[in-house]
Image (cartoon, grey):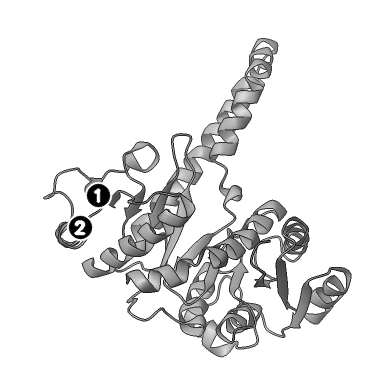
Amino acid sequence: MAQKVTISVDALGGDNAPGVVLEGVAQALEQDIDLSVILCGPAEIVEPFAEKHDRCTARATTEVISMAEHPANAVRKKKDSSIVVGCRLVKEGEAQGFFSAGSTGACLAAGTLVIGRIKGVSRPALATLVPSPKKPVILCDVGANADCKPEFLVQFAQMASTYAKVVLGIDNPRVGLLNIGEEEEKGSQFAQSAHQLLKSSLDNFDGNAEGRDVLDGPFDVIVCDGFTGNVCLKTIEGTAKTLFSELKGIMMASVKSKIGALLIKGELKKLVSSIDPDAAGGAPLLGVKGACIVGHGSSNARAIKNGVLAAAEYVRSGVSELIAQTV
């Protein structure tokens, strides 16, 4: 029997909330019989759902944090919002993890200010498992810290390495620094300083990683500041979306191309599945006391389900405890 876990979920998180959130939570509860959910949001949304679903409890809230609001200010002012209440449940021990596909900035602020940092962590960092047909790689940071100091990247590497050991099963993950060249002297002054500090601090640091190495390189973990990481991740996602859209157009252009598409349909499905961002469901905020998983704003029900399940697995794997021991 798996460890019983309670995850608080933001019912208002995402472009298509609350509909897809409710559907995704229902699917997660059905798939994981040892999972319980505390659904946070307006009473008229969460209470009827909780009445119809076992292992779901409603926590009514009266405030909403919109995408347009300043994240930290909103978290401080709107203490009865679904995001803040969901994180407070983790801090107070009613839940062990939190999931939201709402405002990323608000989730990061609430994770840091409400749940709290692990002792010794200077800056929590957002990590994501970048899907690739070759092999998955963890990219960290992808948006929590736009401005960084070189020493922050050492902690990012330590935390992401711990996460890689758990989710990828790699005992000694190879760490790279995202840069514009392989040589040590390449990049900005920040990148050069970070390289030297990573080299002197980590046994598993393996040098600079260029952009092409993210999807097809020797690294298991790639670290960078949150600004660079976010641009890199969204470039990959946008490129994949554009290429598949164009490929679909080509395959549907004629009878001949449609026949060819039918012949490779199975292999195409495997390729699409291997780079599907919905499979992960969300990115964990490494360095906080508990699981805080942030999903895409455009998440569908499947992505919500996988995000909630990922939060439960994060708790069961003891990632936060392992990071505390490492940092």
* Res 22 quadrant in image: bottom right
Which residue type carries mark 1? Asn
Which residue type carries mark 2? Ala
Residue 47 on image: x %, y %: 83, 78
Q: Are marks 1 and 2 in contact (CB under 8 Å)?
A: yes
- Which residue is rendered at x = 60% and y = 24% of the image? 267
Q: In this view, does 262 lie above or below 304?
A: above
Q: How crowded is mark 2: few (under 14 residues within 10 Å), some or many (20 or more)?
A: many
- Which residue is rendered at x = 66% and y = 79% of the image? 82
* Residue closer to the observer: 273 or 171: 171
Task: Left or right? Give the position of 228 relative to 179.
Answer: right
* Residue closer to the observer: 252 or 299: 299
- Secondary structure state at the residue bearing disc 1: loop
**Residue corresponding to mark 1:** 179
Residue 191's disc is 2
Residue that protrudes farthest toward the left in the picture: 185
Q: How crowded is mark 1: few (under 14 residues within 10 Å), some or many (20 or more)?
A: many
Task: Left or right? Give the position of 269 relative to 126.
Answer: right
Quadrant position of the C terminus in the picture: bottom left
Asked if residue 11 shows in the view, the reply is no
Q: Which of marks 1 and 2 is nearer the N terminus?
A: 1
Residue 46 on image: x %, y %: 79, 75
- Secondary structure state at the residue bearing disc 2: helix
